Image (cartoon, grey):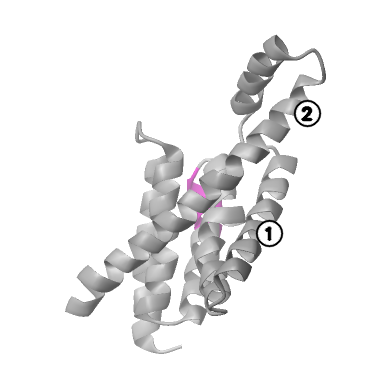
Amino acid sequence: MKAKNIALGGILVALTTIVLYLAAFLPISTLAILTIASAIIPICIIRSDVQTSIFVYIASSLIAFFLVPINISLLYFIFFGVFGIIKFFIERLRKEKLEILLKLVFFNIAFIIGFLINILGINVITGLETIVSRLFDTSTKAIASIILWIIAQPVFLIYDYAMTMIITFYMERIHKKY
């Protein structure tokens, strides 16, 4: 790696760590802050290369496990950090339907992993169980999980679109100037 990429990587690791640390303390949506943190990886790809962005992702994830609450660091490690790299490789295919399918496959794998280690939050499932138990007389945890999974699909596509808009904004307004 070039010295320029190492320096940029170090700065972006520090910035990512600060953003992830703020996710634990700011009274706004954790997912919104994680989205901001995930936008750093595509910016790194644009400013340098994939190798540097992988370094930023790994270093940020490792540091997050020591400085940030475990639920935030796991969300970043499993999905938000790596998505920018996955998105870069998938979008190089230039086949929109295949890209959407592959992104959904990645999202569902990350969703299942996150669900299995229970980082989605017990309160979300418990709240859905309460609502569903009033409507149906069946295994509310299973139905609540299915409802969460169904709702998560379009939310992920909206997130992917928002990431594309953030990258486009960066390319058009910021990157051209520097």
Residue visible at 40% across and 73% down? Answer: 44
Amino acid found under the numbered disc labelled 2: Ala
- Dot label at residue 142: 2
Density class for disc 1 (Cα within 10 Å; few <14, some 14-19, many ≥20) is few
Q: Residue 22, position in %: x, y?
A: 37, 43
Density class for disc 2 (Cα within 10 Å; few <14, some 14-19, many ≥20) is few
Q: In what element is the residue under mark 1?
A: helix
Q: Single out the residue that lies furthest toward the bottom.
A: 2
In the displayed structure, 5 sits above or below 68; it is: below
Point out the stretch of residues depicted in magenta.
62-68
Is residue 93 found inside the magenta-colored segment of the image? no
Is residue 63 found inside the magenta-colored segment of the image? yes
Q: Single out the residue that lies furthest toward the right.
A: 138
Kindly report the distance in space between the C-alpha atoms of the residues bearing marks 2 and 1: 21 Å
In the displayed structure, 48 sits above or below 25; it is: below
- Dot label at residue 105: 1
- Screen quadrant of the C terminus: bottom left
Instruction: Say whether residue 140 is left or right of residue 86.
Output: right
Residue visible at 52% across and 73% down? Answer: 91
Instruction: Say whether residue 158 is left or right of residue 12.
Output: right
Residue visible at 49% across and 65% down? Answer: 84
